[in-house]
C-alpha cells in the first residue's frame, strides 16, 4: 500500500483503520479495542493552479461539512501524492452514511457556498465506494489447485445455507481463471447492504458448520482479495 506524509489541516487523526480499500470496523487508540463505527476515506486530487483557492475555501467553509457528521481528520498530502486532500469520516453504520449523504445533497448552504465552488477545482475524487456486490478472489498455491474445488464447494455451500436461512446475502457465481493469471478462484456475492454484509459475515463465519467446512481453505490460498462493486446504470444485475 502506498504511503503519504500529510500536513494536518483541520484536526488530528485518532484512529488506525483496518483497510484503505473498504469501509470497515477499526482498532482505535482511544479505547484500545475494536470500534463498531464505519469509516470512509476520501481523496481529492486538486488542480495545482487551484490549490490555494481550495485551501482558502475549505478553511472558510469546511465547517458546513462537519455540521453533518464527525470528521476524524483532514490533511493535505506533502510526500507521496502532491495536490491532494485526504479526509476520513466516521459513521454509526452504512445506513447512517446514506442518511448523511442525502442530508448534504439537500443542504443549500453546503451546495451553494462550498460544493459548487470546490468541485471545479478538482482533477478527480476517490472514495471508498460502497455497494452491495462483492467480488472475492484467491490466488491458489499450485500444489493445492486440484483439491481446492471440493474444499471450496463444501465451504461455500455451508455459507450459502446459512446466508439463505438468515437472509444476509446471496452467492451469485463462482469461477476459475482460464486465461491470464492461472490458479485464481473468483466468487461474487450480492449483499442486502454493507451493514448486513458485516453482520452476516460475523454471524455466519462463527457457526460451527462454516468453521469446520472452511478450516482447510485459507492454507491453500497464497493471497486473498476483495472488491466492493457499484452496478452501472446499464448493468443487468442491480
Image (spheres, rainbow, N blue to C red):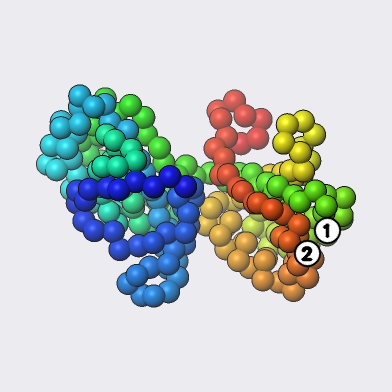
| Number of callouts | 2
Q: Identify the residue at image location x=83%, y=58%.
A: 151
Residue 63 in view (yes/no): yes
Q: Identify the residue at image location x=57%, y=40%.
A: 229
Q: Nearer the viewer, residue 198 or 144?
A: 144
The answer to whether 102 appears left or right of 63 in the picture is right
> As displayed, is residue 196 above or below residue 204?
above
* Mark 2 touches mark 1? (CB < 8 Å): yes
Q: Position of residue 26 (x, y in %)?
A: 44, 63
Q: Identify the residue at image location x=27%, y=54%.
A: 73
Q: Position of residue 189 (x, y in %)?
A: 67, 47
Instruction: Using the numbered discs, state the Cα–Cα distance from disc 2 to disc 1 in whole angstroms.
Output: 7 Å
Few, some or many residues within 10 Å of mark 2 (<14, 14–19, 20+):
some
Q: Nearer the viewer, residue 90 or 68?
A: 90
Q: Which mark is residue 216?
A: 2
Residue 217, by quadrant, is bottom right
Residue 64 in view (yes/no): no
> As displayed, is residue 166 above or below residue 125?
below
Q: Secondary structure at mark 1?
A: helix
Few, some or many residues within 10 Å of mark 1 (<14, 14–19, 20+):
some
The answer to whether 34 appears left or right of 137 in the picture is left
Q: Position of residue 4 (x, y in %)?
A: 34, 46
The answer to whether 96 appears left or right of 180 in the picture is left
Q: Which residue is mark 1?
A: 151
Q: Nearer the viewer, residue 8 or 109?
A: 8
Residue 184, by quadrant, is top right
Q: Secondary structure at mark 2?
A: loop
Quadrant assignment for the C terminus: top right
Q: Position of residue 227 (x, y in %)?
A: 58, 44
Amino acid at each position: 500500500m502506498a504511503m503519504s506524509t500529510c500536513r494536518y489541516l483541520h484536526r488530528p487523526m485518532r484512529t488506525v483503520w483496518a483497510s484503505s480499500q473498504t469501509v470497515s470496523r477499526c482498532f482505535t487508540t482511544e479505547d484500545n479495542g475494536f470500534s463498531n463505527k464505519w469509516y470512509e476515506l476520501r481523496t481529492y486530487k486538486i488542480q495545482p493552479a487551484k490549490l490555494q483557492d481550495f485551501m482558502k475555501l475549505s478553511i472558510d467553509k469546511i465547517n458546513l461539512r462537519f455540521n453533518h457528521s464527525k470528521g476524524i481528520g483532514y490533511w493535505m498530502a506533502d510526500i507521496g501524492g502532491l495536490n491532494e486532500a485526504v479526509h476520513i469520516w466516521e459513521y454509526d453504520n452504512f445506513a447512517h452514511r446514506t442518511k448523511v449523504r442525502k442530508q448534504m445533497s439537500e443542504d443549500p448552504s453546503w451546495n451553494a457556498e462550498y460544493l459548487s465552488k470546490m468541485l471545479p477545482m478538482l482533477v478527480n475524487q476517490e472514495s471508498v465506494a460502497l455497494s452491495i456486490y462483492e467480488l472475492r478472489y484467491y490466488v491458489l498455491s499450485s500444489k493445492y489447485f486440484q483439491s481446492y474445488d471440493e474444499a471450496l464447494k463444501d465451504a461455500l455451500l455451508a455459507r450459502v445455507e446459512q446466508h439463505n436461512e438468515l437472509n444476509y446475502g446471496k452467492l451469485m457465481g463462482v469461477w476459475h481463471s482460464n486465461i491470464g493469471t492461472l490458479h485464481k478462484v473468483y466468487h461474487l456475492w450480492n449483499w442486502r447492504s454493507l451493514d448486513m454484509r458485516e453482520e452476516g459475515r460475523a454471524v455466519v463465519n462463527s457457526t460451527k458448520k462454516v468453521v469446520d467446512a472452511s478450516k482447510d481453505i485459507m492454507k491453500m490460498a497464497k493471497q486473498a482479495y476483495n472488491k466492493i462493486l457499484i452496478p452501472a446504470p446499464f448493468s443487468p444485475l442491480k
